[in-house]
Amino acid sequence: MSYIEFNNVVKRFGDNTVLDHISFGIEKGDLVTLLGPSGCGKSTLLRCLSGLERVTEGTIVLNGRDITNVPASKRNIGMVFQQYSLFPNMTVEQNVAFGLKMQKAPADEIENKVKEAIAMVELTGKEKAYPASLSGGQQQRAALARSIVTEPDVLLLDEPLSAIDAKLRKALQSRIREINQELGLTSIFVTHDQDEAMVMSDVIQLFHNGRIEQAGSPVEVYTRPVSEFAASFIGSYNLLSADEFGRLTGDRVASGNVVAIRPETVGISAERPAGEEAYVLEARVKSSTPRGNVLRYEVVANGIQLRVDTLFRSFHLFDDGAHVFIELPRHACLQIPVGVARAA
Amino acid sequence: MSAKTKAAAPGQKTPLAAKIFLALVALYLLIPFATTLIYSLFIEWTDVLPSGFTLRNYAELFGNMTFWASIGRTLVLCLVSVVITIALLLLAMYVVVAVNRRLGRFMQFVCMIPYALQGVILSIGIISLYTGTGTVLSNRMMMLFGAYTILVLPYIYQGIRNALNAIDAQMLIQAAEMLGCGRFRAYVQVVLPNILSGILVSSLLAESIVFGDFVLANNIAGTNYQNIQVFLQANMARSSGLSSAIVVVIFLVVGAVTAAVLKLQQSSARKA
């Protein structure tokens, strides 16, 4: 039995089914990411677990206790909201102490724990500051401290970093991961950012239209997408229909199947490679775009356009229009069966 | 006009033209008060300058116990009606914010109705509905409390609603719930302190309305529960100097209450 279990959870708003028979388990201490596009139901599931929304059907079990109808305030679940939601009339210290006061903890214990939690999120020195005087990142760290100080059974994070700039977001991603590991705190993180999910998660639950499309470790989900949607949402897979794949390589796959090829598995060179266990094709560079340490080429081979990612080495660039060879390893051409493929 | 079109940027000094313009506007607005003050302090004003300085009107006024009683009644009316309205609205808005947001539209509709009610219609309606019923509401004073509660409802509602919207009260309650706090307790401990300034400002507006009302007080209670405006009306025919002194006192009392509330508001804003 898992630490948290969702059993056939259904949530409807009027005629709109937002969660469609969700069932899965979460192990104690794991950091699980609910990943998916806007409106796929991931935040709703989080709110159902928190108790802020009631499920229409199904049950939620936490540590062996059915909490489906338990009020939010009695679930001992911490939550960090996207909009920070700090209490504006209270200082950082008072915000962090609020949950402990609700638990009627002794004053000295409150003082020690608040100090510890504030130090953990690196806000020491800002104890007396009001939320309005803090930056977005500081406010979110204060909200994080407020949520972990009560030692909840589960920590929920509802897109907490989406309003924070890229550099700070990366730092906070690491801090949240470290806190999850230091405290062994079971955490559920909602995001629509696949990079964020990859960096932070033990397990990714990929959501699509109120259902779980795929579940697994970041490596599993990234390297073995089970549907066209999963392949299109995770990474920048080249998705080819059976017909397109046939035109590109000359090989046939079952009609209706989709072939997914990760851009970084495709080799690109000026000279024809040996190409063992690979399709070697002539191509023309259409464009190139630097993306940090990766250079992305758009190439056209046999009339089919493909994305090719290489490490950005300035001494090895192909100009637009250059004649090149591309190498598609056969094992990197993933066939997604008809029955699983869904419209993205 | 130049002062209006060329607004000073933040951190810049206010241009002299703007200062002069504002001073002229303030002077113009103070003319009625200044003339009333002069009438109350002088015996005659038939020439360019008034003559016969006297404090007789004020001495007579302050020595009149009926005056003090009417001031007291007016303050009680202000306080009771505003407090009742705030208490009822805060409870109702709790339901809207924490239980069912859809009731917000209904609340808005109900609270806007008094805008459409003229004082005469409201007072006649209340009198014909409750007079002779033998209940506590047939008491004229109770009727007056009820009438003012209705009169100030839209003003206080707008103030509280705007303050609640500004802080995203629902989200704050949910955040408090996740920390083990019940909804109502969260409303009291987290939401109310954050909307206090909004409540104070709308109370001030409501209090000014009650203080300045004559129609409801005269129609419903008249001399049975004489407020300051009814007292003023009763004394207008007796002496213009005395009635001027009454107006000056009303102005100063409202001014003092306003200053006190603004002071409170500023100190609560500093804390936040």
Image (cartoon, coloured by chain):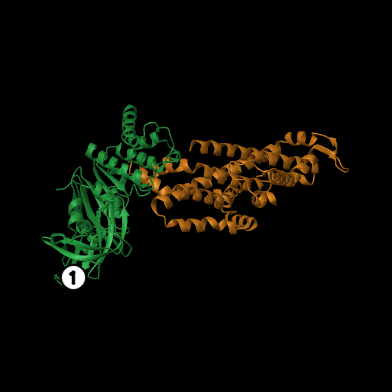
The answer to whether A146 is drawn above or below residue B3 in the figure is: above
Residue placed at 23% from the left, 36% from the top?
Answer: A182
Chain to which mark 1 belongs: A
Considering depth in this image, is A60 or B233 the residue closer to the camera? A60
Instruction: Examine the image and state in which quarter residue A238 appears.
Output: bottom left
Residue placed at 39% from the left, 31% from the top?
Answer: A125
Where residue A148 sits in the image (x, y, percent)?
30, 38
Check disc 1 and give the amino acid type: Ala
The answer to whether A63 is drawn above or below residue A331 in the figure is: above
**Disc 1 residue crowd, few under 14, some 14–19, many 20+, Cα 10 Å:** some
Instruction: Name the image quarter holding the C terminus of chain A.
Output: bottom left
The answer to whether B238 is drawn above or below residue B1 in the figure is: above
Q: Which residue reaches farthest right?
A: B47
| Residue A57 seen from this side | no
Q: In the rendered picture, chain A carries what hue?
A: green
Considering depth in this image, is B89 or A335 the residue closer to the camera? A335
